[in-house]
Amino acid sequence: LISPGLEEKIKFLRELRERRLPVEDMAMQLLEENLRESKQAQMFDVRMLYQLLVEDRVSEARDKVFGMVNGLVDTELKGRRR
Amino acid sequence: MITKVKLLNWKSHKDTELRFGDGTNVLVGIMGSGKTGVMDAISYALFGTLPAVRARAIKLEDLIMSRPKQMDSAEVEVGFIAPDGNEFTVKRVIERGVGTKLSELRKASGELIESPSSTRVTEEIENMLKMNAELFERAVYSEQNRLDYFLVLARGRRMQSIDELLGIDKLEKARKNMVTLIGNIRERIDDKMAEKAQLEQDTTLATLPTLEQDMKNLELERQGIQVKLQQLQPKLDEVQTQINQMREAELKVTQLEKSLRELDGTVNELKRRLGQTREKLGAAASVDPSEIQRQVASSQDEYMKLRSSADQLNILCTKHSSRVGELKTKIEMLRSHIAEVDKEVVRKRAARSELEKAKLEDVTRLVEKLQLDVKEICEELAACRTRLHDLEQSSEELAAAGSVCPVCESPLSEDKKQGLLQQRQEQRTAFTDRAAELEENLKKFEAELKEKIQIQRRLELLAKEVEDLPSLEERGSQLKQDVQAGESELARVQAELEKANSDFERARREVDRTSEQLTAARQTLQMRLDLEHVERELRQKQAEGLRAQQELLRVKKGYDEAKAKALASEFLELSRRQERLRTEFAAKEQLMGVKRQLVESIREKREALARSGVEIKYLEQVVQSLQVVQNAFAQTQTTMRLDFIEAVNGAMNELWRDIYPYGDFTGIRLAVEDDYVLQLRNRTGGWVVVEGLTSGGERTCACLTLRIAFAIVLAPALNWLVLDEPTHNLDAEGIQELAVALRERIPEVVKQVLLITHEERLEAAVSGYLYRFTRNKELDEPTKVEQVTAPEALRGKP
């Protein structure tokens, strides 16, 4: 019933537990493991984003995302002008 | 593992010390006897807080003993063995009004590791135990009556509860907020796309190259005008300079002509004044001023002398006038005095005349005679009255006498007696008559004497009055002589006064005359000096006029009116040309400004268009990325749940045989259906749901297994468990089963269990220490603790 990928992750989690990490750290490490292969997700500081969302600071998270996007846009437009 | 707990003034514990060992340690006692206080103390000592404080149900100060006597502070000391095998002691003190006042962590050897910061002590312990207060509460400490908490939860709530236990409910919260965040970003993408579409329809964007070319052309034209303006300016400056020079010369001519006119006027006025002054001075106009000065000085000397003489005469007049006044006053006073003296003399002469008529010596003699007469009458009257008295007394004695004479004591007959009485009566009548006559005479003489004495006194006064009449008459005569002398002096002084007045009048007239002469001389001198001054001024003004005339001639040579008009005309023409160029320049600049704004606006729009495209691209990428993260949240949540279930099931299967050694149920698991379900495997290999289908003992064992599995999975390093009142909902068989499991089988998988119960039957569960708690709540007594058994005592028992 469990997919091989999921089984891998459970194994990873089990190893984390054996290292006696707190549950939240385990969850975060697993989350980072889940996102490791996704290049798209690497554009964020996932821990920071997670912390803002957990604390219901959605507008702050939104401002940070827009700030990051503005930075990317500025860089690209500057490159084009050159 | 907890090794010891020491409590001072902690809740109902005045001074309690407990030791704990491996296996199941039991605290048994009635409700309110202070058992749970021990568990609260362990939680507070390890983590600086406890569930009720975290839930804000109570404050730390409420843990200080308040009955029977309110204490100021409480102290807790807990010994424990960390997962690395080292033993430590943690001590904390609460003070009323302060909170936690002291926290310290020491090794069993006494070496201080951390103090006094409560937070740092807690952090140190959390690192050692790999656990915080929240996890302790979730995994290790089963609160009162909550062993079967999981089964009591309604289906559909268990997964949520387990998520909370694992802390992965936060992933769900983050995932939900991620949906909101993605929605916000999509709204932004929509806004940007609308903005982009609008910009793409803007036809002005295509006109940018034409506008830029226009701008270049305008700039060239503007520069051409600027060059022309720059070339024109020096010419204008030069003409302006020449015009200024001409204007200066013109101004100078005007000023000089005006000065000359003024000087002519001044010279004429001075000449007029000279004529007038000479006319007034006449011959003196040709006299030297020093000579006039000498005349003035001479006149002044004469005037001063005459003035001094007149002043002295004036003083003499005043002196004589004053003397005349004095003499007149004196004469008037003397005359008044003479009138008074004359009046007195007349009065005294009348008195003397009266005195001469009355003759004082006669009256004096008559008074003396009358005084003698009065004296004689008085003496006779007194003798008469004495004789009368004697006769009356003698008559009374005689009338009262018998036959013997009261005077001579000779025999006295009645006839003789009557004869003597008659004789005496007659004598008395004679004396009475004489006394009356004497009294009459006395009155008459006394009246006459009184009258004569009054006359005598008046005459004596008159005599005294006239005593100073001669001297008074002499005084009157003297006064009259004085009046005559005063009148003679007055006449003399009046004559002198008249002469002095006459002299003074003459002197005064002389002074006035001399004064007029002096004033005239002074005026002559002043006019003569003015004449000299005016003559000097006239010469000076005439010289100035000459100089101005020469200067005017010189300046007029450098001023050409025709040239000035030509220059003004040229300047006007150049200025107009410059103005035209400037207007043209400003128009070009204005046009350039308008076009520049237009170009900038179009560039901004093109920039915005480009930016919108790029931003939309990145925002879409962000949405995709966030969706990946959102999926990762969900995936992590699922993985965590599955891992947890796998781990719990693994642990439970390891434990089950030890906790439940019977053959009817051979396995246990937490199955995932629509929610988590706790199941037992029967002999046939089928799975039955624990709640409702099994006995109380089986249910308790299953719950205990689940609870221990949670502890192992969530806090694998700790290896100890706290069970507070686990017998809730258990029947007698269940309690017995639980006691056996806790005593014999649980210690095989969990090194230490601390069991709190009111159920005395669970005393049978003990394999470590057994403590019995008692307390008289009616009297608010402190908790009393009796150590019933110790592990050493149990070792010998089967």
Image (cartoon, rainbow, N blue to C red):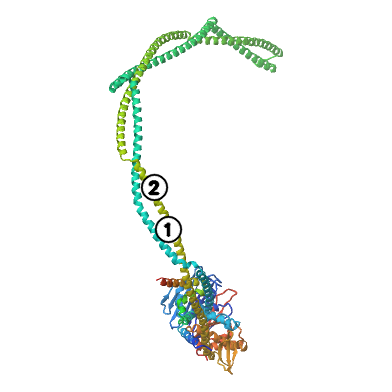
Displayed quadrant of residue B311 = top left
Q: Position of residue B337 (x, y in %)?
A: 47, 12
Q: Mark 2 lies on which chain?
A: B
The secondary structure type at the circle numbered 1 is: helix
What is the spatial separation of the Cα atoms under label 2 and label 1, in whole angstroms?
A: 26 Å
Q: Where residue B674 is drawn, which disc sits there?
A: none
User: Which numbered disc flags the more N-terminal residue, 2 or 1?
Assistant: 2
Q: Which chain carries label 1?
A: B
Front-lying residue, B164 or B281: B281
The secondary structure type at the circle numbered 2 is: helix
Q: Residue furthest bottom?
A: B684
Q: The residue under label 2 is which amino acid type?
A: Leu
- In screen coordinates, is B438 left or right of B214? right
Q: Where is residue B409 in the image (x, y as percent from the top left)?
A: 65, 16
Residue corresponding to mark 1: B589
Front-lying residue, B145 or B276: B276
Front-lying residue, B487 or A56: A56
Front-lying residue, B7 or A80: A80
Q: Where is residue B763 in the image (x, y as percent from the top left)?
A: 56, 85
**Numbered disc total:** 2
- In screen coordinates, is B326 left or right of B633? left
Q: Taking B277 as reference, is B567 above or below it?
A: below
Identity of the residue drawn at 40% across and 58% down: B222
Q: The residue under label 1 is which amino acid type?
A: Glu
- In screen coordinates, is B524 left or right of B340? left
Identity of the residue drawn at 32% across and 38% down: B556
Residue corresponding to mark 2: B572
